[in-house]
Amino acid sequence: FPLHVSPVAREDGWESESENKLDGETASDSESKSEFGGSPPVPTSDDTPEVLNRALSNLSSRWKNWWVRGILTLAMITFFFIIIYLGPMVLMTIVMCVQIKCFHEIITIGYNVYHSYDLPWFRTLSWYFLLCVNYFFYGETVTDYFFTLVQREEPLRILSKYHRFISFALYLTGFCMFVLSLVKKHYRLQFYMFGWTHVTLLIVVTQSHLIIHNLFEGMIWFIVPISCVICNDIMAYMFGFFFGRTPLIKLSPKKTWEGFIGGFFATVLFGLLLSYVMSGYRCFTCPVEFNNDTNSFTVDCEPSELFQLQEYNIPLVLQSVVGWKTVRMYPFQIHSIALSTFASLIGPFGGFFASGFKRAFKIKDFANTIPGHGGIMDRFDCQYLMATFVNVYIASFIRGPNPSKLIQQFLTLRPDQQLHIFNTLKAHLVDKGVLGGSEDA
């Protein structure tokens, strides 16, 4: 199938090729395309709103794209601030909606290849597996963070007790449905799409689940990493647009070293400043917890040491430059350097991965949901990689045992089990010298 690359696509770094092949495409790739029905065409329509087209009609295509991206970026940032203001529950709902939309965009690409054979159940099974995986992950989250509420309601207690068995049974049903849907002469294609669905679930659902876990640790662990990725994306684009000369990677021909380096320094500075501002507010630093008395989320606590100002000595080499010997800052700001560094140096590889995926299937964007930006997945390709890092970082360097969760679980035990734990803990504390003998107990 000949590939006709539009001028818009070519401007974004896509190249026309005389033999209708992308970089690295081999004969076996061409043969596989005949089996899978060919690659979906590159979208050529201009999805820019008519009002912007009229307002920017006198500009060159380069500056028109700059203004379109800038205006839509400001609109998305404004929307981001609004959902933060609306609180944790709205944030979780938005994460779920973004997850579903990203899944839809990736599955649709596969469906465009698969649909030509009109084989049964692929789209139905894809959404069924999404439902199963979300049931498993969010069921685990509900049991973990709303333990007291679950134990209080009989139906929820039963679902919690047999949650993993129910999840496995649901998945097994989908697995059997897939086997029954196999059609002679198209086995390879169907297994290919089965794998496509599961890899999509791994990338999208798992990462969105980690984002929500990060949110429960405190909104600052949600906002700062996401903001650092957004900042890096914007500043790398700005530095690359005005100063870019040296290509960075072939997968994204418009990415430059100037943009990459400029985005790094700007993001680290932004992370330090944003962390300083947010660390002073309990609504951002306190873990998001569920209050069983009011049946609502609360974010009120005594700030941990991470969010209390401390004095640090400046290295002698820098003292002569800045003129200070010490500096007062929040310990979280030091952690923000790690977060912003990852967002700047490793986060973009999520975008490069997405670029390679799109080049493999000869598409410019995952969708045309956001004019000038592409689909939702085009905006969140780096965010998912960031979510995994933040979750691993918290588990490795931040999170410790949670006494409130231990007490909740302790209270659900039988009286004899509680007494056994009490006596064991008492004996341990006596041995440690924390408690006196039995006469002091």
Image (cartoon, rainbow, N blue to C red):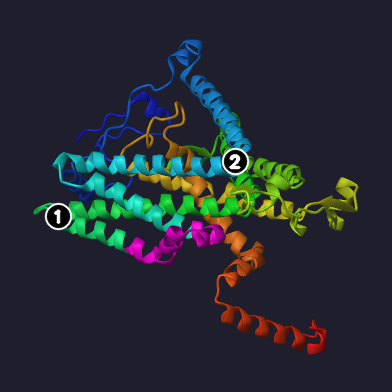
Q: Nearer the viewer, residue 104 or 374?
A: 104
Question: Image check: 75 left or right of 31?
Answer: right
Instruction: Give the label on residue 294, or none.
Output: none
Q: Nearer the viewer, residue 324 or 248?
A: 324
Q: Quadrant of the N terminus?
A: top left
Whether residue 154 appears in magenta in the rendering, the answer is yes
Mark 1 residue type = Leu
> Where does the image place residue 243, in percent across and percent down from the top left?
60, 32
Q: Whole-Å distance between the Cαs marked 2 and 1?
A: 45 Å
Residue 437, quarter of the rendered image = bottom right
Name the residue: 45% across, 45% down: 352
Residue 37, quarter of the rendered image = top left
> Where does the image place residue 295, in percent across and percent down from the top left?
59, 49
Q: Residue 212: tell me if it is visible.
A: yes
Name the residue: 13% across, 52% down: 186
| Residue that badge 1 annotates | 182
Of helix, strand and loop, which mostly describes the magenta segment? helix
Neighbourhood count class around disc 2 (C-alpha, 10 Å): few under 14, some 14–19, many 20 upward: many
Instruction: Give the label on residue 232, or none.
Output: 2
- Residue bounds of the magenta highlight: 142-168
Mark 2 residue type = Asn
Neighbourhood count class around disc 1 (C-alpha, 10 Å): few under 14, some 14–19, many 20 upward: some
